[in-house]
Image (cartoon, coloured by chain):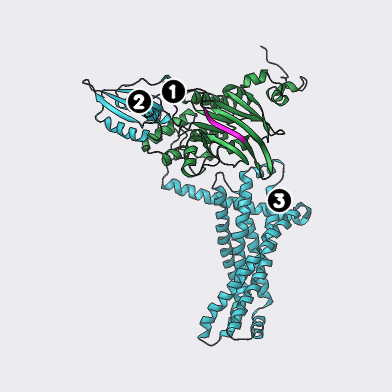
Amino acid sequence: MDSKNLYSPSFSDTIIRVERLTVGFDEEVVLKDISFEVQRGEVLVILGGSGCGKSTLLKTMIGLLDPMHGRILIEGDDIVTAHGETRKAILRKIGVMFQSGALFGSMSLRENVRLALEEYTNLPREAADLIVSMKLDLVGLHGYGSRMPAELSGGMQKRAAIARAMVMDPQILFLDEPSAGLDPITAADLDELILSLSENLSMTFVIVTHELPSVFAVADRVIMLDKKLKKIVATGNPWELRQNTDHPLVYQFFHRNEGISHKKRRTPVNPLPL
Amino acid sequence: MADKTKQPATVDSKTESDGSLILTYSGRLDCLSTGTVWRKTSHLLHPLPTRLIIDAANVSYCDGSGIALFFSLRLRGLRNHFPVDVRNLRPELVSLLERFQADTFNLRPATAPPQTNLPTEVGLWAWRIWKDVFEQVAFIGELTTWMTKMLVHPRWVRWGDFFLMVERTGANAIGIVALLGFLFGLILAFSGAISMKQFGVEVYVADLTAIALIRVLGPFLTAIIMAGRTGSSYAAELGTMKINNEIDALTTMGLDPVRFLVLPRVLATTLVTPLLAVLANLSGLVGAAVVVLWLGFPLVTFTSHVERAIELKALFSGLVKAVVFGLLVGGVGCLRGLQTEIGPSAVGISTTRAVVSGIVLIVITEGIFAVLYYSLGI
């Protein structure tokens, strides 16, 4: 299963299987008994209101938090119980972009992105440099390699973090709020990059986001979490969910502007002539 | 039958009669196995071919590293003027490869690191010193202004924060100041006793220790402890606040950071340092008393010698110094915190600067006081 041919992406085989997962902190349960699967090459978006456990779920899926109960199988290996080399092997299959970027502040962008290549591969220096340049080019940061993270804007730091996350071409990329704080043009470029990687390299994406335009642009499927019920309340294609849902939370999420009366909506004082 | 997708990457070469080189890649071209093939490819390109044909028909798996290998060959072809033809690459990967244009791809950073030379370095160094001095003067001026205003409007001081700081910098430091003061007195008395024994005047260890502690070492030791403990804490606290934009938030709310954050802290250290100096003096005397008892003299001998050695003006001269030390340690700690720049190491740098600046200022001030007291006959 490790080397599923990248040339034949399909949603026919499961790359992540979450089984009866319960997560929380101390005695407080955040999500209870949830199960879902992610298919290879799929772009799955996790949605939900603030505090519903999206980031907690993501952190549990990448092995940073221990669940109270349940299993998370990545290509059949349970990341919860894996130790030593098995865990390292699982971690090599995934790349993570954290909400804040989490770039190493004492290293330049080039050094940040190159780090994993230096540690895990035997690539010659010139090869590693070229790969780093190409990854930075992919995220629109070509020429910024010598900059320090503190010298970049928040959006640029996020894009650099994505370059770092995908430098080893992991099979799965976990992105926590990738578009938050980005301008619409940069966010659209990022969406295009996700689609390109998904289509060309059959990379699997698990994305936590609130940005609806990005959701509709990239998601093959969404799962929506509910804070009160502590479980998944909807799953499916975002366009279909938007049209056909009888769940009030899902409806409210996808039709948020419709709840505002026309009087309260902002309208231009002097509309431009068409 | 072996899984073809798991076979490591290999490269075979064939040179045509017209000087064309055909490189046939097979197996898995991922970041873990491409390195070996990359090196072999570099060797195969000597001598340079007239034309390079890359055959990727047998590549079972390819990721960004494989694409980078093919792209590097295109770059090399462009640089050395031979055409490069990539054949049988799957359409999905062709589109990924075509994203990078060899003729416009620049490996060098657009922003080259600035070139420096000795005059520039010296100029920058002088400018930094000037800026630092300017900021210190401005800070002292601002602090003095607020302290003057405080005398007129005592309610402007955030007394809740002040008492919290007194607890943190004073009450919480009692243990360490008492312990170090005791040990310092013990060591001082012991060191003095070794020399004095040669002359048979060990009993004067009490006088030596009392004078040294009360006039110089008690306040000095306390100030050093305060610089390491409190000055660094102020710098780290204010530095973190600056990085988190909390100081900007205060400013935009119309609240002066000096009044809001610096004044309670500086007042607290100014009040607490002389009190802790008294504690250090007492602890040091206890340490010295232990040595005198150990030398075989009764306690009453020690107390009578101490009483005779210490004058009231010596005690007050020490305490005045402690007040100034407290002001310096608190002020420089807050200043370094407010000067914190951006980056993960910024808070660490501010903390270090607070401690170093604090100690340097303490030593310089101690020297100034020594000359002053000598001139005044204190």
Residue A5 drawn in magenta? yes
- What amino acid is at disc 3? Arg
Magenta segment includes B13? no
**Residue at x 59%, y 48% (from the top left corner):** B339
B365 in relation to B347, above or below: below
Question: Which of the 4 image quadrants contains residue A226?
Answer: top right
Q: How many marks?
A: 3
Can the viewer see residue B372 in this picture?
A: no
- Specify the amino acid type for callout 1: Tyr
C-alpha distance separating marks 1 and 2: 22 Å
Mark nearest the camera among 3 and 2 is: 2
Residue beneath the point at 61% across and 44% down: B243
Q: Which image quarter is the C terminus of chain A in?
A: top right
Residues rendered magenta in the picture: A1-20
Look at the image and give the colour of chain A: green
What residue would you read off at disc 3? Answer: B259
Name the element at disc 1. loop
- The amino acid pointed to by label 2 is Arg
Q: Label 2's element? A: helix
